[in-house]
Image (tube, grey):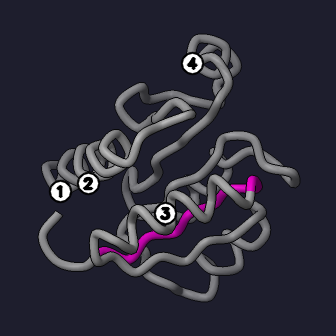
Amino acid sequence: MPGELKLLVVEDDNAVRALASRILLAEGHAVLGVHTLGEAREALERGDDFDLVIADVMLPDGKAGALASLLTGNRLLLTSGYDLSDLMASGDVRDVESFLPKPYTPRQLLGKVRSVLARFEGRM
């Protein structure tokens, strides 16, 4: 991930959001952490240009997949503690490559961010 990235972390669990933000900040990235789908929508609709949105699938006010329509390309990394096969069966997760199961390590988070962005850049 050359250079600073601008990342939006959407996570209703304060501890998980703080940890993910610290991991990403330590790598030199700019991070905005929000608690709800509504807050994420506001950030995206006001024109904040995020390189990637990292969002928990299940949020208090909806499902993170709803953010996809507000993003350019596939710049959405979904996370969840729920079973991947259940999330895929329900349609909440469509792309295994853009999914990170919780709990995750700092190395797993950073690796998945790199992987998702590399895939996106490869499509341009």
Q: In which quadrant of the rendered image does the C terminus lie? A: bottom left
* 32 part of magenta stretch: no
Q: Amino acid at mark 2?
A: Leu
Q: Which residues are magenta?
A: 5-13
Secondary structure at numbered mark 2: helix
Separation of marks 4 and 3 at Cα, in angstroms:
23 Å
Q: Amino acid at mark 3?
A: Leu
Separation of marks 4 and 2 at Cα, in angstroms:
21 Å
> Which residue is denoted by mark 4 in the rendering?
84
- Residue 11, quarter of picture: bottom right
> Which residue is denoted by mark 1 in the rendering?
121
Q: Position of residue 100 (x, y in %)?
A: 46, 35
Asked if marks 1 and 2 touch (Cβ < 8 Å), the reply is: yes
Separation of marks 1 and 4 at Cα, in angstroms:
25 Å
> Which residue is denoted by mark 2 in the rendering?
117
Query: Nearer the observer, disc 4 or disc 3?
Result: 4
Which numbered tag is attached to residue 78?
Answer: none
* 12 part of magenta stretch: yes
Above or below, 87 relative to 53: above
Which numbered tag is attached to residue 71?
Answer: 3
Q: Position of 30 compared to 14: left or right? A: left
Dot placed on the residue nearer the N-terminal end, 3 or 1? 3
- Name the residue: 74% across, 73% down: 39
Dot placed on the residue nearer the N-terminal end, 1 or 4? 4
Separation of marks 3 and 2 at Cα, in angstroms:
13 Å
